[in-house]
Amino acid sequence: MPPIKRTRITMPRNTPRKTNHTRQLLTVKEVAQLDNCSEKTVRRAIAAGLLDVIRVGPGGRLIRIDPSAHAAYRRAQLL
């Protein structure tokens, strides 16, 4: 009797889907550098609800800011 040929069926890993629209989110540090202020000032604006954020990562601990939300915040500060 010939040996049994075994084959392994593998499933694709959970890789992020490639999309046509990739947006670059900003960190608190990057926003602070763009606005020439401290990270604490940016965090105060977030806490006051003046700057919209996106929470990512485990438990939503990481804060990211969409560039359009940052632009809206800057426009509101100029008024």
Image (cartoon, rainbow, N blue to C red):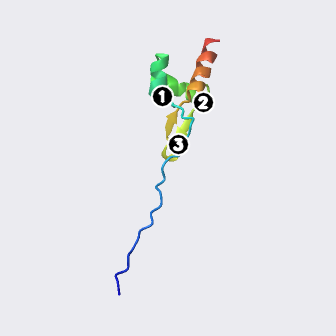
Q: Comparing marks 3 and 1, which lies closer to the viewer?
A: 3
Q: Answer above or below: position of 36 versus 57.
A: above
Q: Give the x, y percent position of residue 33.
A: 44, 20
**Looking at the picture, does residue 31 appear above or below residue 8?**
above
Mark-to-mark CA distance, 2 and 1: 12 Å
Counting residues from the start of the chain, the first of labels 3 and 2 encountered is 3
Please report the residue visible at 51 percent of the width from the left and 35 percent of the height from the top: 63
Q: Residue at x 51, y 24 (%)?
A: 42
Nearest to the observer: residue 46 or residue 25: 25
Quadrant housing residue 66: top right
Q: Dot 1 corresponds to which residue?
A: 28
Q: Disc 3 on helix, strand or loop? A: loop
Q: Quadrant of residue 5?
A: bottom left
Q: Give the residue number, with chain letter if any, for mark 2.
A: 52
How far apart, in angstroms, are the residues tagged by discs 3 and 1?
A: 26 Å
Residue 51 percent coordinates (x, y):
59, 26
Instruction: Indicate the quadrant containing the C terminus: top left, top right, bottom left or bottom right.
Output: top right
Indicate which label's residue lies in the foreground, 3 or 2. Answer: 3
Tell me the CA gap for discs 3 and 2.
Answer: 25 Å
Residue 55 in which image quadrant:
top right
- Residue located farthest toward the bottom when viewing the structure as drawn: 1
Q: In the rendered image, which residue does mark 3 sit on?
A: 18
Give the left or right position of residue 50, taking residue 37 as reference.
right
Q: Is residue 53 above or below residue 17?
A: above
